[in-house]
Amino acid sequence: MPKLFQEALTSGKFLVTVELDPPKGVESGELVRQVQTLKDRVNGINLSDNRGGVMRMSALAACLLTKQAGGEPILNLACRDKNRLALASEALGAAGLGVSTILCMTGDHTTHGDHKESKPVYDLDSVQALKMLKGMMGGKDLNGNALNGAPTFCLGGVVTPGADPLEPQLLKFTKKAEIGLDFFQTQAVFELDRLKEFIQYARKFEAKVIIGVRLLTWEEIVGYRDGSLPGVLVPASLIDPLRQAGESEGPKRALELTANLIKEIKAQNLGDGIHLMAMGQEHLIPEILTKVGL
Amino acid sequence: MIVAQRKPFAAIEAMLAPYKKVLIAGCGTCVAVCLAGGEKEVGLLAAELSIASQIKGRSLMIGEVTVERQCDREFLSELKDPIEDCEAVLSLACGAGIQFLAEMYDPKPVLPGVDTTFIGVNEEVGFWTERCRACHECVLDVTGGICPKTICAKGLLNGPCGGTVRGKCEVDTEKPCAWTLIYQRLEKTGRLDQIRRTLEPGRYDRRTTPAYQTHPAYKRRFEAHA
């Protein structure tokens, strides 16, 4: 397995990335254990940036811990919590510390998290932020001031292929793709027909597309309704059987569903890899990867 | 119009607790339309306060007055006598009116009787919705008359976030996604090209300090602000 994510991106092999949350506190033992378990089975480990608006250790600090544990970190950078100065300085800090792969996103709204009353930032949107980061690679900050040493980033953006209607998403995707990103990571996908429609369009651009696959938790299954998971659409034909299977069988079937989705994505060539989001069930990731032969 | 809502009665009572003679000052423009601070609301609040103070055995004299606009010195000057005659003023105008009143009659304590909520429109009697964030950089020509800075919960300028589900907003799933609305309106009229180019980041330096503006015809008079 190529050591660097950038090398893996151009290797032509089916990519596997996973998402880990930095600790809610300073106890980082669990994160390090997860990295040690997964590092040889995946091409990159996303360290989420206050995912869902829930305050955690900084993603960059968690990237360093990941790197020290032998993992290949992907820094998540959300526009929700940082203005243009903070986004740029965080990215420079990352590059300075040897973390050069950045996935930049808008970020779930603060009202979804555990600090609902906080002031959401969104000074830049994800298109503007990615454009700024790309510009920094040319040695200039957003206002054209020279940088003392230009960073080399491997830049990724996010897209939601399951959006309905899809066209507004494609409009934004195109703006990002035209910046010249290295890769896209999609929001969790459950409907392959929608994914096919999207991937057909996405193939017009050079960026690799890594398809998001989410292992639903029992709580997510029970509480699911349209909009309960931002950007994630699970059709009734998939969620109802999981719910009906009950608390002991339902999660097992959710795991089967995840494995089947990955198999289909790979078999039908619907993406350049998968990004697995286990939502707190990271201990199940090796089992899923084994099931699908990755 | 500027929309406001009256503060909870208990909060108003607590603000007025140190005073025995207060003037409730209404505003006859925006807050009157949104039924928060016009002449009628001044009367209702005065009656409520009067009854509450009688029940509690507290001495409270309440004066009532409503001017055309509290954001205009000409109308505020009408308040000179009643304000001299009271210990504190409870203004039911928007935040701008309250401040202008406080400035003009300094050091008389001027207290807010409403919370100013937004710049919006009168959808129907009793129902108002927000439409403008007064950002200094209107993009409504590009976005088909729908403001992404106001209607999009994240104020995004270049398309929807990834959280929209079935055309609804990630933050309030009862509300439509602003960018879905913008896309659909522009598509209908063949103007989608307008949003294919990337809109640049906002200029927050223009909104960092309290804004002022001078009409070109008055530049000489207000040279310091021109």
Image (cartoon, rainbow, N blue to C red):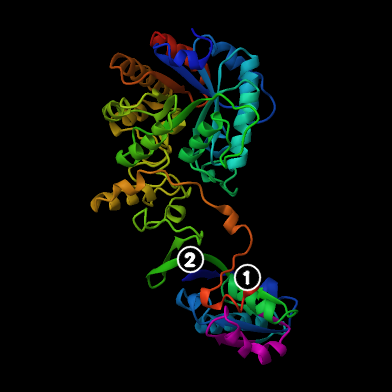
The residue carrying mark 2 is B119
**Residue B24: where, in percent of width, then height?**
62, 82
Which numbered disc covers residue A120? none
Camera-side residue of A115 and A217 = A115
Badge 1 marks a residue whose secondary structure is helix
Q: Chain of mark 2?
A: B
Q: Residue at x 61, y 39 (%)?
A: A145
Please report the bounds of the magenta region as a residue range: B63-89
**Residue A240: where, in percent of width, then height?**
32, 31
Q: Earlier in the sequence, mark 1 or mark 2?
A: 2
**Residue A217: where, in percent of width, then height?**
45, 28
Please state, as top left, top right, bottom left or bottom right, where the C terminus of chain B lies in the image. bottom right
Horizontally, is A276 left or right of A150 in the view?
left
- For badge 2, the amino acid type reads Ile
Q: Is residue A146 above or below residue B219?
A: above
Mark 1–mark 2 contact, CB under 8 Å? no
For the residues labelled 1 and 2, the Cα–Cα distance comes to 25 Å
Instruction: Check chain identity for marks 1 and 2: say if they share one.
Output: yes
Horizontally, is B91 left or right of A130 in the view?
right
Q: Is residue A195 above or below residue B8?
A: above
The residue carrying mark 1 is B225
